[in-house]
Amino acid sequence: ERVRRNHLNDIENIIPFVLIGFCYIACNPNATLALWHFRIFFVSRLLHTFAYQIPLPQPTRAITCMISGIATISMAAQILLQVY
């Protein structure tokens, strides 16, 4: 059950990140900044998976989820700023 819930959580977070990531890359961002967005998201989701499966105390899981969300929101904000 824990693996199923973890998989659903990944789907809820990774699909929006990929879609926003494609739009972000299409806007021709700074390559270094884009690479750091992708790295931060990947590491935070990896740590979130470990925190979910081991299981680690709750603040660990919430913090890693927030970090991946911040990376996605940051990319979306940069897309909106470049469009308008």
Image: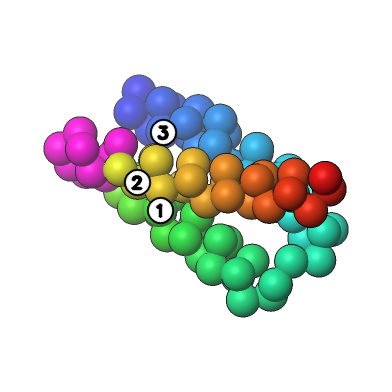
Using the image, determine if residue 3 lies above or below residue 1. below
- Dot 3: element: helix
At x 47% / y 60%, what residue is drawn?
Answer: 40
The reply to whether residue 84 is in sight is: yes
Query: Principal SS element in the magenta part?
Result: helix
Q: Nearer the viewer, residue 66 or 1?
A: 66
Q: Earlier in the sequence, mark 2 or mark 1?
A: 1
Residue 84 placement, left or right of 3: right
Which x, y percent locates residue 79? 74, 49
Using the image, determine if residue 55 lies above or below residue 8. below
Residue 68 placement, left or right of 33: left
Residues under numbered marks 2 and 1 in contact, where contact means CB atoms less than 8 Å apart: yes
* Tag 2 residue: 64
- Dot 1: element: helix
Report the mark closest to the observer, 1 or 3: 1
Q: Residue furthest front?
A: 84
Res 53 → quadrant: top left
Amino acid at the residue labelled 3 = Asn
Amino acid at the residue labelled 1 = Ser
- Dot 2: element: helix
Q: Which span of residues is magenta-colored?
A: 51-62
Which x, y percent locates residue 4? 43, 27
Task: Give the CA separation, mark 1 to mark 3.
Answer: 14 Å
Res 24 → quadrant: bottom right
Q: Earlier in the sequence, mark 1 or mark 3?
A: 3
Q: Nearer the viewer, residue 46 or 20?
A: 20
At x 82% / y 45%, what residue is drawn?
Answer: 84
Task: Give the CA separation, mark 3 to mark 2.
Answer: 13 Å
The reply to whether residue 22 is in sight is: no
* Tag 3 residue: 6
Q: Which mark is residue 44?
A: 1
